[in-house]
Amino acid sequence: MTERQIAILTAIIEQYAEVAVPVGSVTLAKLFNVSSATVRSEMAKLEELGLIAQPHTSAGRIPTDKGYRFYVNLLTNRADTVDELDRSARAIEARVSTHGTRSDRAIRSAVDSLVDLTQNLGLATIGDELYISGMGNLFSQPEFLQGTNAQSVARLLDNLEPWLREAAPNEPLNVFIGSENPIGKSSGATLIISRFRSPYSDRSYIGVLGPTRQSYARVMRLVRQTGAMLEEVL
């Protein structure tokens, strides 16, 4: 892929995350100061690669799961230095530290903070239970207002705890995009989780579940920082 194609894919993903409507060539042409024809040509190549799709005729483009995966891999290999995120992480730490030695309350507080900051569903393993918060956030997203997607996400949640125990994802940050999810592959959901050591287990998890239409850079960093902070505090 060329640098311009990567830049256009990135712009589509980031704008779609903000507005939740397909991104058109006119918008991108203004952004990159090129003609709409040039953008349409580049978009056609991205579509051939399976990175974007046209949901219906005469619409703009939206990212595919493959497009999101390419983007997430870029983020994983790139160092982020965003002060706002550092402030958010410090705010979570301050909220968590008020619970002293109560590990269960500290983890719940961290989850609730992630819910507030990301507007996703938050989750964490606390011993043998799965703590979930922010269900309303998840099912208020436009992607999950349709019955089929909502049922698929619910199925993912119902089976998430046994799957985490069985699969035990081993990275400090794990991102499962859409069809990469072990359950609910067609739900259009992304699971972003961090593994950390806690008094309950060496394989505790905290993270968020939301639509594939995510502000990945921000959410991934927040989840990773929260996992690292809990490991240090607990």
Image (cartoon, helix red, strand yellow):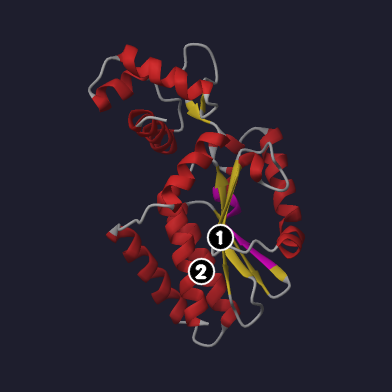
Which residue carries the number 1 mark? 207
**SS under mark 2:** helix
Depth check: give the residue in front, 220 or 189: 220
Asked which quadrant contains residue 222, the reply is: bottom left
Could you tell me if residue 36 is visible in this image?
yes
Total labels drawn? 2
Q: In this view, does 166 lie to the left or right of 97?
A: right
x and y, in percent, of residue 149 in the image: 67, 36
Magenta highlight range: 130-137
Could you tell me if residue 60 is visible in this image?
no
Q: Distance of mark 2 from mark 1, alpha carbons? A: 8 Å
The residue drawn where x is 57% and y is 36% is 65
Report the disc number at residue 179: none
Give the mark, 2 or 1, whose residue is nearer the N terminus. 1
The residue drawn where x is 65% and y is 44% is 180
Q: What residue type is labelled 2?
A: Gly
